[in-house]
Amino acid sequence: MRVLVTGAAGSLGRAITVGLDRLGHEVVCLDLVPPVDGSPFAWHEADCTDADAVAAVFAEERLDAVVHLAGTPEEAALPDELTSHVITTAALLDAMVAHDVPRLVYASSNHAVGRTPRADGELGEHVPPRPDTYYGVAKVAAEALMRLFAERHGTDAVACRIGSFLEEPTSVRGLSTWLSPADGVRMVEAALTAPAPGYAVLYGVSANTRAWWDLEPGRRLGYEPQDDAEAYAERIAAGPDDEAEAEFVGGPYATARLHRPALG
Ligand SMILES: NC(=O)c1ccc[n+]([C@@H]2O[C@H](COP(=O)([O-])OP(=O)(O)OC[C@H]3O[C@@H](n4cnc5c(N)ncnc54)[C@H](O)[C@@H]3O)[C@@H](O)[C@H]2O)c1
């Protein structure tokens, strides 16, 4: 497939572009910033919040799918979050419809449901949206927009609610939420190639022994994670905030530390 990867210069973007290339996909990159030296991929320096700039990329490239990873990966003021996640997704979806690009894979987040109490048990794909932050609110809204386009235009749209994408887990919570780079590539590949998913949600975590996510929605799309954070458990020391962060699925994002005015 010829795949546009937005946010290609970022942490997920660097791993996913290389992984998709190894799997035989043709990768086209888009990011606000120029390519790192030696990047072998076609590269568009553009802002996904700029609908005209996004349309210009689609006019130039023949594409089979979009993997949307561009966006701020942390909490900020509500308007900035909505711009970074909802407006970017809207610009891409509009261009996809205009150019008959049939599939979007989106880096959503566990923080879309982060205010779900851990006591509720394993999280399935149909739990109600329960954002823990403005970041989470924006992810929920981006997912809703994907669903609208799936139902209105038939766009296949897979929202991957990613846990913690890192080389290795670094905290007790991470032993549950870790997504390894190799599993991240497996996840995106499955979301790109699953036959006719329509609108679908999967949990983007590895096969962690301590996970509290239902891996079945991903497995139905062909995502079979192979790594387990437990392999790192002995190296991880308990932290002072572990107990407070264990109350809600969103961990630190669901604690009072991040409370701030929506428009502040
Ligand atoms: N890293 C994680 O553990 C994690 C977990 C859940 C979800 N996510 C989501 O995955 C996505 C990527 O996260 P990351 O950790 O790689 O972040 P990152 O900050 O490392 O990379 C994001 C990239 O997007 C680019 N970008 C930002 N805004 C842009 C715009 N408007 N137009 C074009 N490019 C833009 C940045 O230049 C950067 O290269 C984000 O949407 C984030 O919310 C990440």
Image (tube, rainbow, N blue to C red):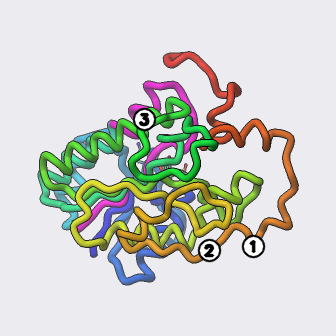
Residue 243: image location, x then y, percent: 79, 40
Give residue 149's position: percent from left, percent from top: 20, 46
Residue 111, above or below 24? above
Question: Left or right: 230 with respect to 101?
Answer: right
What is the distance, in whole Å, between disc 3 and disc 1 at their CAs? 33 Å
- Residue 37: which quarter of the image? bottom right
Image quarter where the N terminus lies is: bottom left
Question: Which amino acid type is marked by label 2?
Answer: Asp
134 sits to left or right of 178: left
Q: Secondary structure at mark 3?
A: helix
Q: Is residue 215 left or right of residue 234?
A: left
Q: Are marks 2 and 1 in contact (CB under 8 Å)?
A: yes
How crowded pointer 3 is (Cα within 10 Å; few <14, some 14-19, many 20+) is rated as: many
Name the residue located 77 percent from the left edge and 69 percent from the top edge. Answer: 232
Viewed as shown, does residue 22 lie left or right of 181? left
Residue 76 on the magenta span: yes
**Which mark is on residue 195?**
none
Q: Which residue is mark 1?
A: 231
**Type of residue at label 3?**
Ala
Q: Which mark is residue 227?
A: 2
Mark 2: which secondary structure? loop
Earlier along the polypeptide chain: callout 3 or callout 2? 3
- In 3D space, how far apart are the residues under numbered discs 3 and 2 (Cα atoms)? 29 Å
Q: Residue at x 24, y 72 (%)?
A: 195
- Residues under labels 2 and 1: Cα distance? 9 Å
Above or below — where is 181 with respect to 84? below
* Amino acid carrying mark 1 in the image: Ala
Q: Nearer the viewer, mark 3 or mark 2?
A: 2
Give the residues in magenta. Answer: 64-86
Q: Which mark is residue 138?
A: 3
Where residue 151 appears, as percent x and y from the top left, is 17, 48
Does the segment drawn in magenta span residue 65?
A: yes
